[in-house]
Structure formats: C-alpha cells, structure tokens
Image (cartoon, rainbow, N blue to C red):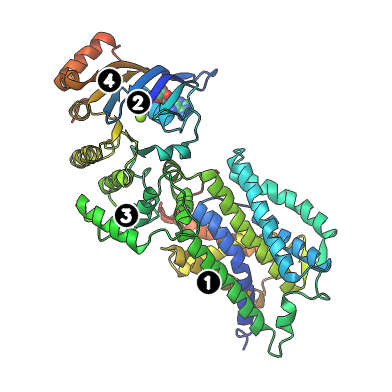
Amino acid sequence: MFLLDIIPIALEQGLAYALVALGIALTFRVLAFPDLTVDGSFPLGGAVCARLIVDGMDPALAVCAAVGAGFLAGCATGVLSTRFKINSLLAGILIMTILYSINLRIMGRANIPLLTVATLMTPLESLSVSRYIPVIGFFFIVAATCKLFLDLFLHSEYGLAFRATGDNEQMICSLGMNTDSATIMGLGISNALVALAGALIAQDQGFADVGMGIGLIVAGLASIIIGEAVIKPRTVFRLTLATIIGSILYRFIIALGMRMGLAPTDLKLATGLMVIFALIIPAIKGSKEGKVHLRGV
Amino acid sequence: MPPPMLVLSEISKVFNRGTQDQKTALDNISLTVNQGDFVTIIGSNGAGKTTLLNIIAGTHNPDTGRITICGDDITRSPEHRMAAYMARVFQNPTTGTAGKMTIEENLCMAELRGCKRRLFRWGVTRHRRQQYQAILKTLDLGLEHRLGEKVGLLSGGQRQSLSLLMTTLIPPKLLILDEHTAALDPKTAAKVMALTDHMIQQNRLTTLMVTHNMHQALRYGNRMIMLHRGRIKLDVSGPEKEQLTVKDVVQKFELSLDDETLLSTHI
Ligand SMILES: Nc1ncnc2c1ncn2[C@@H]1O[C@H](COP(=O)(O)OP(=O)(O)O)[C@@H](O)[C@H]1O
Ligand SMILES: [Mg+2]
C-alpha cells in the first residue's frame, strides 16, 4: 500500500533525528535557552566521525569522539553566553558559523562518503532480513537509552537544580546552584546528543556533508511541538516521550507530504510554516500560557 | 566571644555611576547584627532596602566596604556561594519557588541549599517524601497530599508559605525577607507573618526583614532600622523599640526627614 512503505522510513528517520529533538528539548524546553548551535554541532558529529572512520579508527570510538566534540561545541556557546554575557541567540549563531569552517577543516572537503568503509551500520546491513528492521531496532535502542538517560539525569539532585535553572534562575541561584555552570553543562549535553545523531546518521546515510545540519533546529522544534500536541508534557518523562513521538510523526508528515508532491526543496518552507503556525496559535487565542519562556534573549 | 553574625562596614553602592541616572542606593552603611537578632527594616520607596539585602546576599557587589558573616569575609562572593549562609524569601511569591516543578521537588532543592547536588543520587526519594509530608502537615495548608502537584497551581499565600518552609527546612545562619507579605491580601499576609514569626522563634534564626508595614516592623523583632536615601536614620532595639509606636516614628520622621518621605502605615 501507498502509506505502508513510508512507515519504515518515518520510523528510521524519526528515531534517528529524535536524538536531535531531545537535545533541543533539553535546551529550549528545560533550560529555556534558545540554543542555535545545533545546526553546526550536528554536521560536526558527522564530520568528526566520518573523518576518523576513514582514517581507520574503530567506528564506535569515532562516535565517542564525535559526542565529545559536540559537548565542547555546546560548552563554547554556554561560556560565551554566561561568562561573557553575549546574547544567547547570538552566541549560538557565532559558534554555529565558526563550526562551518571547522567542519570543512575536519573533513578536508565538503563531503566524505562512507559507503566503502566499515561502519556501525555494516553488521546491521549484512543481516539476512530487510535492512529496515535492524536499523530501526538500532535507532530505537539508542533513542530509548538517551531518553532514559535524560529522565534519570533530570530527576537526580543535580537534575532538579538544573531544571530550576530554566524555570526560576534567581531562586535556584539563591539556593546555591551555580546557574552559569548548569547552563554550560546543559548546552554541552544537548549538543553531545545532537553530535551523536550526526555521527550515527552519517553512517546510516553513507556520507557526512557539511550542509547536513541546515534547518535542523526548526525541524527539531516542529517535532517537539507536534509531540506536545499529542502528549501533554506534564512531567519530564512525558516531555521526552512526546519529543520522540513528535520526531517520528514529523518525519511521517514530511514523507507523506513528499509522497503527495511536496518538492524536497520546499521542505524547510513547510517546516518553518508549521512552527510559525504553532507559535502564533496561542497569540491568536490570546492565551498567555502558550507563550514560550526563554532566558537570555 | 564569637564574631557577630553579620557585619557591614562602610558599604556604599551607586547605580549607573557617571550617567544621568546616577543613583546612590547605599551611602556608607555600617551595621552589626548579633546572633539571634530579628531586625525589621523600614524606609520609603527607593530608600535602598532591597539593595541592602541584595548586597548581603551577593546579588550585587558593593562599590566600597566589607561584609563578614560569622567572621568570614564574603564581600565579593558570588551569589550562589551565599546559600551556605543564608536563605531568602522574596516579595513576589513566584520568585521563591519554581512554578513548573512539583512541591516535593521544590522542597528537595531547598533541602540541598548550599550543599553539593549529586548527579548520581536520586532527588525526591521515598524517605524525603515522607519527611516533607510530615513537615507540611504541621503547616496546615492542606499541602501534604499535593506533594506531586506543580507549585504554579498554588495560591500566592500558599506559595509564600511554602517558600518560608523551604528556607527553614535546613535552618540558615541568616534569614532574609524582603517585603515577603506585600503581595498578599491582608488576611493571608497576617497568616504568613504569624508563620514567619513562629519559624523564626522556633529555630532562633537571625533575621533581616524588610517591610512596608510599620505595625509589622514594630510588633515583630527585637530591633528596627529605618533607611532613608541609603543611610540608616533610625536604629532602635530592646525596650526602646518595644515602647515605640507608629505615631512616635511618624513624628520622628517629620522632624528629621523631608516631606517626600512616605511610609505606608496601613495594617
Ligand atoms: N539594578 C538597579 N539598577 C539601577 N538602579 C537601581 C537598581 N536597583 C535599585 N536601583 C535604585 O536604587 C535605589 C534604591 O532601590 P531599592 O533598594 O530597590 O529601594 P527600596 O527597596 O528601599 O524601595 C532606587 O532609587 C532604585 O531606583
Ligand atoms: Mg524593595
């Protein structure tokens, strides 16, 4: 059937990009920090991983290196914004722009193909079943693990104060939390997740490309908004669940749109409109509640 | 003899120095607060009361002067380090609690005030939850069965009472209250004030309380300070304070201060 064959695509992409959405939810939703580093840290993850694999490193280790690089990129944005008081949006844009050059340097060119080398996906693809089943299973396990990790983290003693940093910075500062380091840490973790996604997706699609991160923040926000429409994010557990479900639904909607004739080049237009629409609904309804609370803008 | 609880020596603070909006908020203030003192602070709008508290709490750094708590020099300590010494309740009930988090999560964060917050330790454990339930029961606000509810759903009075409870969960060396009943309706304000006094007496807390309400300032505490234009204009304690009436203060005011001084005397 016409719809059935887009389901595995939506699941694979949705679960893979769910890591990006989780990272964005951690900054935008939990920390209330509008972090734009993501568009740069995603290809950073892909670039570091691809380069290291091509240079002969074990793919698993290459992924770890990519995660570390993403963490550092997030921390850089955090330091600019907290220690040097640069507007949070600008700090993200600065690091994102800088990362473009860095990613080109790391790769040595704009694109590294990974089709001829052994990656984490190689053993999955050599199984005798349809390629989708092991790949979807793999991304499901990764996304579920990251969700669980975030759930646990956000309920730890540190995690409570971390959430309060986004909710009421003044209060938790007066209770002894260094909110600057919490912000830096949060941006680091968020971008580590995003870079992990970049590293895994590069291996899945068979190449890393310097442009692979363009528009990811908006796509991530769209995923979160869709997810929250389906599952009210009353608790941390539900927020992370909504984010993953939203990511799958978003990819499903996109796949459906393309099937119905949406040009791939209009994808970002459609996604952007989706987010704008979701953001202006509360304004039109006149409700105060839906207004997004963001720090440091 | 142990060092006094809090010593401010020659503290000054000027905002927007060198601009048209230059404003001397604190002008060479010296103040010594002893262990167990409950000091009420009054003064007209813009007298510098909040700035004084902010400087003690590390929110602002003073331009000149020195602050010590229990003999430790804390003049340039960042705000989050001050949590080991003091706890605050703010004027706005929404400032003292995290509205999107639950009652028990807020209490847990308060229990860890000034302590190390561990990454590998669960926050609201079953043990903690039971403790919070028992403590909330004593407050009699009906909150003991709502531990898992978001604080944002509470009324202003409930939220402010919770903030108070949060400050005394681990008794601080110094309790700082900045017009913490001003945003509440009179009846709730009286209730919260009674609770405040009870907690201060029970824990023998050294307290600085800014209030707009002169009756409150006279009725509670063993010492009263009046600020005007960043200076201490009146400092009474002990029996002298007990005999003071609102009328006395107003008269004294008019003798020593300009006409623009307005103190609200409503209850
Ligand atoms: N962050 C600030 N920046 C500039 N001016 C300030 C700031 N905080 C306070 N002031 C000024 O300092 C003076 C004292 O303010 P404040 O301490 O808030 O007074 P009070 O709490 O007694 O009403 C006021 O004139 C106020 O405008
Ligand atoms: Mg004030």
Which residue is found at the position 64% from the left and 47% from the top? A77
Element assignment for label 3: helix
Q: Are marks 2 and 1 in contact (CB under 8 Å)?
A: no
Judge if badges 1 and 4 mark residues of a common chain: no
Which residue is found at the position 71% from the left and 70% from the top? A60
> Can residue A209 be seen in the rendering of this structure?
yes
Give how far across and how far down residue B235 sits, in percent.
27, 18
- Dot 2 corresponds to which residue? B4
Element assignment for label 1: helix
Residue A245 marker? 1
Q: CA distance from mark 2 to mark 3?
A: 41 Å
Q: Is residue A182 above or below residue B236?
A: below
Ligand 2's quadrant: top left
Element assignment for label 4: loop
Q: Are marks 2 and 3 in contact (CB under 8 Å)?
A: no
Q: Earlier in the sequence, mark 4 or mark 3?
A: 3
In the rendered view, does A172 fall on the left or right side of B37? right
Q: Amino acid at mark 2?
A: Pro
Q: Nearer the viewer, residue A274 or B56?
A: B56
The picture quadrant where one finds residue B8 is top left
Q: Amino acid at mark 3?
A: Leu
Q: Is residue A256 above or below residue B62?
A: below
Residue B262 marker? 4
Residue lying furthest bottom:
A128
